[in-house]
Image: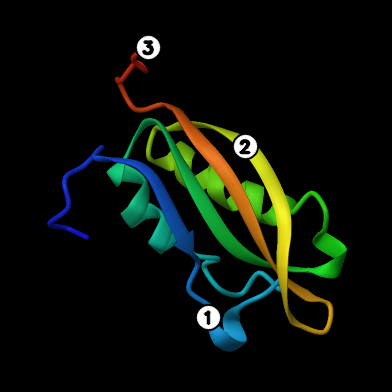
Amino acid sequence: LPTLEKSSFDRIVAPRPKEGTLDGDQGKGDAGKDFLMAMLPLLKVKGELHWYDFAADHELPNCDRTRETVQSVCQSLGLEMEVIHVAKVGSIAKRQFRVCMDFRIMRGLNVEPSN
């Protein structure tokens, strides 16, 4: 990723890496934060990221943990984002699901969106 030009993508499809025993709603892994930190600078203002994550059945339908993870990474990078849609997109195990959260970068650090 270091060779890719910053703010050069309109859309990124990103399946979060699974972290084995550190994964899930137990809060032990990094929930893909490092992966998001690497990808978000590549996205243009008004660009969309389709973030595939993992959620337990009790986290549906809001997926607050996923929303909070993405929001905190965006804030740490000085980005303003809006959630477009969150949906359950598949099952990976009993009571464990793959979810997709679509979100848009509305403003970057010291960058105003163009019309």
Give the mark nearer the N terminus: 3 vs 1.
Answer: 1
Q: Which residue is mark 2?
A: 83
For mark 1, what is the residue?
A: 19
Find disc 3 in the rendering and name its residue: 115
| Residue at the (37%, 40%) spot, across then down | 77
Closer-to-camera residue (107/15): 15
**Outermost residue, top side:** 115
- Most extreme residue toward the right is 58
The Cα–Cα distance between marks 3 and 2, rounded to whole angstroms, is 20 Å
* Label 3, label 1: how far apart the Cα atoms are: 39 Å
Can you tell which of label 3 and label 1 is closer to the viewer?
3
User: Residue visible at 16% across and 45% down?
Assistant: 5
Q: Is residue 94 left or right of residue 22?
A: right
**Amino acid at the residue labelled 2:** Val
Residue in the foreground of this view, choosing between 33 and 81: 81
| Residue 71 to residue 37: above or below | above
Dot 3 or dot 2, earlier in sequence: 2
Q: Residues within 10 Å of mark 2 (few under 14, many from 20)?
A: some
At x 56%, y 73%, the residue is 29
* In front: label 1 or label 2: 2
| Mark 2, secondary structure of its residue | strand
Q: Quadrant of the C terminus?
A: top left
Kindly indicate whether the residue at mark 1 contacts the one at mark 3 (C-beta within 8 angstroms).
no
In the figure, 66 relative to 27: above or below? Answer: above
